[in-house]
Amino acid sequence: MEKQTAGAAVRAGIPIFIGYFPAAVAFGILGKATGISLLEAFLFSSVVFAGASQFIALNLLATGMSPTGIILTTLLVNFRHFLMSTYLSTRIREKVKAWYIPMAFGVTDEVFSVLSFTRGELTRTFVLMLEFSAYSGWVSGTLAGFLLGGFLPPVLTQSMGVALYALLLAILMPEIKSSFRSTFLALASGLFNWLLVYMDVLPKGWSIIVCILVIASVGAVLSVSVPQKEEAHG
């Protein structure tokens, strides 16, 4: 088993860097098309560092949604990070709580996946260097995309919004293939959100918040009830 050194963390982070950079370029290009400044795009990625949630926030910003709604939406989308960070905190070798906040900040789905499959207790150096590899790919890609967006025609820069759907589908497809429940929830979420938008009874952008809360609650109920049924038949 490879030791958890800084070099090992960088090697483990190279695939994440390669995956993050082009997605961040798309975000930077879309940010340029939306009308935010280079500094705002940089702060978006360096302070928020939330991947798909940044695309969602940018889209909601373009629709004119209030800051409160944008913050609440991204909080709900990223709520899983509380669970991931809590789990990883139990596996950190050096129990120095002062480092928990920076380590929690760098947790993403891909970073969590790599750390989850890393055997043994996790060292602070390994965690931070792995997270820095992912972070540097996202931030540098955002800056590169924003600068590149200044040389692209408007029709091409605006089409970068499709990157959001591609990114979300890439995350969702493996689960859909292996779980009928996930397929049902994904379809129900899309139909429910469409219904809320069509009825136009909520403030702009708030349909996605209601949709997240309702479908997540349904998913939680199904997650509890399905195992019980399986045990009853076992």
Image (cartoon, helix red, strand yellow):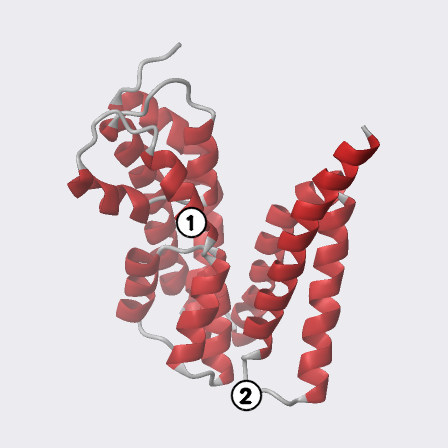
Q: Which quadrant of the figure contains the N terminus? A: top left
Under circle 2, the secondary element is loop
Left or right relative to 70: residue 165:
right
The amino acid beneath tag 1 is His
Q: Which residue is mark 1?
A: 81
Task: Answer above or below: position of 162 versus 172.
Answer: below
**Residue 31 % position (x, y):** 42, 69
**Residue 190 % position (x, y):** 71, 67
Q: Which residue is mark 2?
A: 203
Q: Which of marks 2 and 1 precedes in the sequence? A: 1
Under circle 1, the secondary element is helix
Query: Between 16 and 207, which is closer to the camera in this rendering?
Result: 207
Task: Answer above or below: position of 145 versus 106.
Answer: below
Q: Residue at x 47, y 39 (%)?
A: 110
Task: Answer above or below: position of 12 versus 33.
Answer: above
**Residue 138 % position (x, y):** 38, 50
Left or right relative to 77: residue 219:
right
Q: Residue at x 71, y 39 (%)?
A: 227
Residue 128, image quadrant: top left
The amino acid beneath tag 2 is Pro
Q: CA distance from mark 1 to mark 2?
A: 27 Å
Residue 221, image quadrant: bottom right
Left or right relative to 87: residue 210:
right
Task: Answer above or below: position of 105 versus 152.
Answer: above
Whether residue 151 is visible here, answered yes or no, is no
Q: Residues within 10 Å of mark 2 (few under 14, many from 20)?
A: few
